[in-house]
Each structure stands twice: as structure tokens, then as C-alpha cells.
Image (cartoon, grey):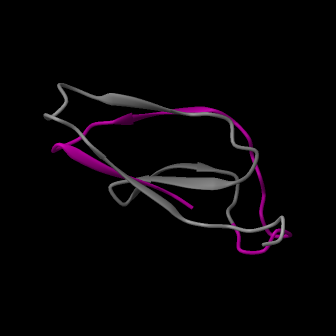
């Protein structure tokens, strides 16, 4: 694989019981562009994601995302 590539990542968090209120997730600084989804809904976009390296517009920065699980699980995704 060359040094320039892209991918999609998914993670499902399962809780022993439904959380009382919100849960915070810290996304450390990522030195490229990305989009972050919670249960399929876009909640954070840093820079411009593209399939070609020349078209990508990176933007680094740490973020804190608040999760409010409606059930005992939540699906996280990133492009």
C-alpha cells in the first residue's frame, strides 16, 4: 500500500446498562481530513476528505464529541 490511502472505520460501543446522561469521547489531533459519524449521523468534519491526495484539504485539531446513547449501544464511524 502506498503512503497515500483512505479507509472507513466502524466501532460499536456496548454498555452494561444505559448511561445516565451523556458520554464524552476525545478525538486526539489527526493530521489529515476526516468525517466522524455517530449512529450514521455526521457530527464532526475536519478539513475536506477526498479519494485523491491532491484533492484532500487536511485540517488538524483535537475535538471532544458528546454521545447521548438512546440505548445500550452506539455506533461510531470515520471516513
What's the magenta bit mostly, secondary-structure-wise? loop
Residue drawn at point x = 80 percent, y = 69 percent: 55
Residue drawn at point x = 27 percent, y = 37 percent: 68
Query: Looking at the image, how many numbered discs can be counted on the residues?
Result: 0
**Residue 3 in the image, given as x and y percentages of width and height:** 84, 64
5 sits left or right of 8 in the view: right
Segment tinted magenta in the rendering: 50-79
Residue drawn at point x = 74 percent, y = 51 percent: 32
Location of the N terminus by quadrant is bottom right
Q: Is residue 52 magenta?
A: yes
Q: Nearer the viewer, residue 10 or 62?
A: 10
Q: Is residue 59 magenta?
A: yes
Q: Can you name the residue that lies furthest to the front here?
A: 1
Location of the C terminus by quadrant is bottom right
**Residue 27 in the image, given as x and y percentages of width and height:** 56, 36
79 sits left or right of 19 in the view: right
- The quarter holding residue 2 reads bottom right
Residue drawn at point x = 76 percent, y = 45 percent: 31
**Residue 71 in the image, given as x and y percentages of width and height:** 15, 44
27 sits left or right of 49 in the view: left
The relative height of residue 66 versus residue 42 in the rendered view (above or below) is above
The relative height of residue 7 versus residue 29 in the rendered view (above or below) is below
Q: Nearer the viewer, residue 4 or 45?
A: 4
- The quarter holding residue 29 reads top right
**Residue 70 in the image, given as x and y percentages of width and height:** 18, 43
9 sits left or right of 75 in the view: right
Amino acid at each position: 500500500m502506498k503512503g497515500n490511502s483512505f479507509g472507513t472505520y466502524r466501532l460499536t460501543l456496548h454498555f452494561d446498562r444505559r448511561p445516565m446522561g451523556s458520554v464524552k469521547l476525545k478525538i486526539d489531533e489527526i493530521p489529515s481530513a476526516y468525517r466522524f459519524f455517530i449512529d450514521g449521523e455526521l457530527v464532526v468534519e475536519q478539513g475536506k476528505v477526498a479519494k485523491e491526495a491532491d484533492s484532500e484539504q487536511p485540517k488538524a485539531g483535537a475535538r471532544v464529541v458528546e454521545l447521548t446513547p438512546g440505548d445500550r449501544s452506539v455506533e461510531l464511524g470515520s471516513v
